[in-house]
Amino acid sequence: MSSTVLGRNAVTVNKKYTEYFLPTVLTAMATNIAMIVDSIIAGNLLGQNSLAAINLMSPISQFYFSITILFGLGASSIISFAKGRRDEKQANRVFTSTFIVLIALSVIFIAIQLPLADSISSLLTKDAELKSLLYQYYVPFIIGTPIYLLLMCSIHFVRADARPAFASNIVIVANAVNLGLDFLFMGAFKMGIAGSSIATVTGYAVGFVMMSTHFIMKKSTLHFDFSILRNPVQFFKFLGKMVTIGLSGALGTMLITVKMLFLNTIIQSIGGSAGMVSYSVCSSSQIFMSMFITGASQTMIPIIGVCLGEKDYDGVRYAFRRAARVLAVSSVVIMLFICIEPEPIIKFFGITSPTDIANTVPAMRINALSFPGLSFSFLLLYYYMATQKRAISTAISIINGIVILIPSALILGKFFGITGVWYSLVVAQVGTLVVVYFIDLAEKRKSGGKYKNFYLLEETEDNELLALSFKGTKENAAGVSLYLSSFLSKNGIEESRANRIAVAVEEMAASCAERMEGKKKFADIDIRIFADKNETIISVRDNGDEFDPLNDDKEFEMSPLTVVKAISDKVEYSRALGFNRTIIKL
């Protein structure tokens, strides 16, 4: 048992986080990289006014993104929690309800925006040339509304359905199509800035077709359940819960829309079109950073959802810490790179004028200083959203979005010109973290000792006897069994029950080792044991191949699972997020 660690560790959560991180970052690109790619190509092929026009679309694209957060992330959080509690019926009904709402919203958005596209363009810019370019880009974007909303929300569901790699493949293909068609439409076909927008919508359409195949495959554990339409009370209950859970994340994104509208106005009034060119590059660099913020933060959400459903608070903390480490490294590296070498990035967007480059260099450097604060502000926002501390996450959204930024931009801009506006981006992030610190402190004091640290987890499972993590080998199975027999007896568990617990754990670990036999890697196993005078509950979670102990094909042989069922009062099984989870009651 040399490789056994007789204590709980973060191995299973960290491996799941690693498995999901890159696909989630690539998923974030579906929203963000399309506009960056469009900006780079349009700036090089069509000139810097086209670059500025695409940036003016940012408030609208951010609004759309907020809708996918509201319903996609909100619904997937409920689905992950339901799967953690083994409630497949609720998971399917929430999934179906989301699709119905998105189709209805798509019809409404198209009906409102198409007739008003010219007026909306006028609201976003007073410059006649920029307005004309913006309108050409905007109209195809409106027509692609249903494809965008359904695709971006469904990617959350595909990830929650334990297929993160497939979700990333959708993103890669969609953006490859967009990139190729950008050159074709804007270059060879001379379609101007409208070609860029059409290319983006076409890429989304290809991704949507790919995504649709998942839900008709046997691998999918999510299925449409239209019986929810016969129960409007439950339908609106699910809708309200989705909105409540996803509101803080969506509000944070919506307020980015408001922030962009205000900043666009302030920057144009102080710095003119030259200021907008600088802000366009800064905005694109921030969008690049947001890929990592979204990837690191949203990777932890389904993991936290499942762990909360299982009341595994250690797992919640492990997921948050891993996300924090990823963001700490990525934000500092990106910040340093921009501060050291801003000019190549600026020229990459097609900006060649020495004056424009000179104006944009300080803007880029100052904006990059805000990245670490921005990263942790949104990490905390998503964490408190996932742990259902909605008031705190909503407060972070509002504070980060407008409460500090807009006043500081107006004040600093008045006294220090356009440089003051750039510094307001840093002030907003530092100010948000300071305010969050005091909010967290107040919550801990108000809890009367229930919350011990900033995680704000009320851990009520005081009958947990033991938590172990170890590699799923037959050697470890036997070693852990011996350890449990001794440990449980010393902690007041009667000998016969202690032996049954030890045997159950050994047989489950042996079954896991048997399933992974011949594979390159052993599975990782987490064991948690809860006991009172009347009942013992053993929670076994592993990341090995899928199986169902309730339908063991070795029922008539003396297999490990047959032994477990024979000595147990009840065995329950569920699979969520690629984890096997078995509950054994003795």
Image (spheres, rainbow, N blue to C red):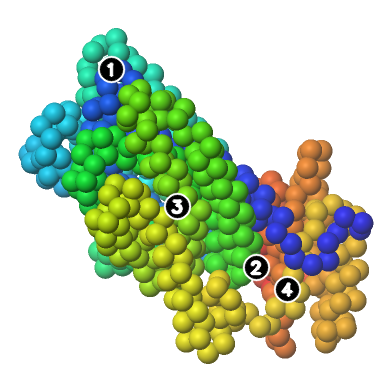
150 left or right, relative to 576:
left
Q: Which residue is mark 2?
A: 314
Please tell me which of labels 1 and 3 falls first in the chain. Answer: 1
Cα–Cα gap, marks 2 and 3: 31 Å
Distance between the alpha carbons at the discs numbered 3 and 4:
44 Å
Name the N-terminal-most of marks 2 and 4: 2
Q: Which residue is mark 1?
A: 186
Foreground of the two, 372 or 569: 372
Chain-order first, disc 3 or disc 4: 3
* Residue neighbourhood size for the residue with mark 3, other residues' Cα within 10 Å, grouped as few (<14), some (14–19), many (≥20): many
Which label sits in the foreground, 1 or 2? 1
At label 1, which amino acid type do we have?
Met
Which residue has dot 4 on it? 529
Q: Quadrant of the N terminus?
A: bottom right
Q: Where 120 falls versus 434 (above or below)?
A: above
3D distance between C-alphas at marks 1 and 3? 34 Å
Q: What residue lies at 37% left-to-right and 33% top-to-bottom?
A: 358
Mark 4 or mark 1: name the one nearer the start of the chain: 1
- Under tag 4, what secondary structure? strand
- Judging depth in this view, the residue of 506 and 524 nearest the camera is 524
The residue to which callout 3 is attached is 370
